[in-house]
Image: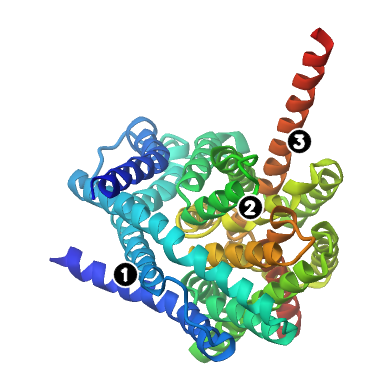
Amino acid sequence: MSLLADFLQTLLDTLHDVAPIAIIIAVFQFMVIRRPVANLKQVLIGFVYVVIGLALFLLGLERALFPLGRVMAMQLTDPAFLFDGVAQLSGVIHWAEYHWVYLFAFTIGFSTTIAEPSLMAVAIKANQVSGGSVGVWGLRVSVAIGVAIGIALGAWRIVTGYPIHYFIIVGYIIVVVQTLFAPKMIVPLAYDSGGVTTSTVTVPLVAALGLGLAETVPGRNVLIDGFGLIAFASLFPIMSVMAYAQLSEFRARRAKRNRTGSG
Amino acid sequence: MGAGLRAFAGALVSSSRDLLPVVLVVMFFQLVVLQQPIPNLFELIIGLLLVVTGLTFFISGLEMALFPIGESLAHALARKGSLAWLMVFSFALGFGTTVAEPALIAVADEAAAVASADGAIGPTAQARNAYADGLRLTVAFSVGFAIMLGVVRILKGWPMHWLIAGGYVLVVTITFFAPDEIVGIAYDSGGVTTSTITVPLVTALGVGLASSIRGRSPLVDGFGLIALASLTPMIFVMLYGMAIQ
């Protein structure tokens, strides 16, 4: 019975989330554009699908995966696990002791990005408008690899305690240099992939990992070090998507050269 | 009806495939690394079924409602030819969808609690609420501004990379002047602003706008709104931190 109550609560939350959007659209549709919506019935059914789907999705995550993931993040960063119950002799912990944390960060970053609904939406749209030249799976996998690297590196940064803005500034420089060489058509899409990766699935798990790390690593401040993982997760997909486009362009060019060379 | 049912079954299969990696990762760490049993296996299976069903509904609703409505609004506003209304609409969309965003509310409250514990603001609940509300309004305003700027960019055909590079320069410059405590929150606030419903709608708006203006390519000009919406909150939140200090 609590399942039903939880579902209604999540549904209410989702409706609350959709309400401002629905109101803005309705106001503009009826007061500014003043024309009836095409296929109104279909659009309304679609909205109901979106709300119910999102509510079920969030409810399932909250019941099944998030509790387990949060406990896992806490356990993996717990000194008792890291040092097999042996009290460490000095206060200094070598960053390599946290290898399971980095692997967890990498794999959870990759797998949650694959399941991210807003990335699916952008990939579907990009595939449509590019006439199929931007593949849905190619885009999703390259974004997921970017998020995985970003979160693993972000976890390493929390452990070592290097200031976040050095990483971000170097990342920006790489993005700007890549922009000069990447195929023009991919650039705006790559920038967008940075923003879409971090919504419903990734944020709760990644935030738990970051806060868990900042609380248990000696000398870390939760405010300065705990946040910042999400920023890494938004920066690295930009690089990986541009790299993916550069790689496919390079391969296409080489294939063409081989063909003309042999024929 | 048989075709519809088959399409639904196909969507279910692809949703399950999307979810499989997360399940494998969690299982591996629980069973192999932490060496603990799975608690509440039954609950877990129910939860996963809900996630898969939800994802299937969401993706169908996307194609039926969010994409068409975003594009038809973009076409209608472009045909109307009123730049002012287009800007009001894009600002309202960005501001309205962000100010009530649960992820943002959570991050703002968290940030206020930590700032209060650190002594950056007063220890009272009132001070914390004021700080969190200020943060939320700042982020919502900056997202509204970003969508508006992005729409103007599509109309004028400005190259995306100039805006992004300019934004980066601003972010980096302000970072040196902003208080350390706000930097992490500012960088993260860029990521939490774009919700699962906003992203498809804003993407459809950009693509629809770019395809209804002659000489614009939907791929090159239509994307980029979300990137701006992730960039401007960093700038404005750091400015907020400097103003509060």
Residue B63 image-quadrant placement:
bottom left
Q: Depth-wise, is mark 1 or mark 2 nearer the camera?
A: 2
The percent coordinates of residue A31 (x first, y second) are: 54, 91
Distance from disc 2 to disc 3, alpha carbons, whole Å, reads: 16 Å
- Packing grade of label 1 (10 A; few <14, some 14-19, many >=20) is many
Three-letter amino acid code at the position of disc 2: Ser
Q: Disc 1 sits on a residue from what chain?
A: A
Three-letter amino acid code at the position of disc 1: Thr
Q: Residue at x 33, y 41 (%)?
A: B10
Q: Residue at x 56, y 71 (%)?
A: B72
Q: Which residue is mark 1?
A: A10
Does B55 sit above or below residue A248? Answer: below
Quadrant including the C terminus of chain B: bottom right
Q: Which residue is mark 2?
A: A193
The percent coordinates of residue A193 (x first, y second) are: 63, 52
Q: Residue at x 60, y 41 (%)?
A: A132
The percent coordinates of residue A85 (x first, y second) are: 40, 37
Please identify the residue farthest to the left as the structure is shown.
Answer: A1
Q: Is residue B120 visible?
A: no
> Answer yes or no: do the residues labelled 2 and 3 have beta carbons within 8 Å?
no
Q: In terms of secondary structure, where does tag 3 sit? A: helix
Does A168 sit above or below residue B78? Answer: above
- Packing grade of label 3 (10 A; few <14, some 14-19, many >=20) is some
Looking at marks 1 and 2 on the same chain, the residue that comes earlier in the sequence is marked by: 1
Q: Disc 2 sits on a residue from what chain?
A: A
Q: In terms of secondary structure, where does tag 2 sit? A: helix
Does B100 sit above or below residue B162? Answer: below
Q: Which mark is residue A246?
A: 3
Q: Is residue A100 left or right of residue B24?
A: right
> Answer yes or no: do the residues labelled 1 and 2 have beta carbons within 8 Å?
no
The percent coordinates of residue B61 (x first, y second) are: 40, 61
Q: Is residue B176 left or right of residue A62?
A: right
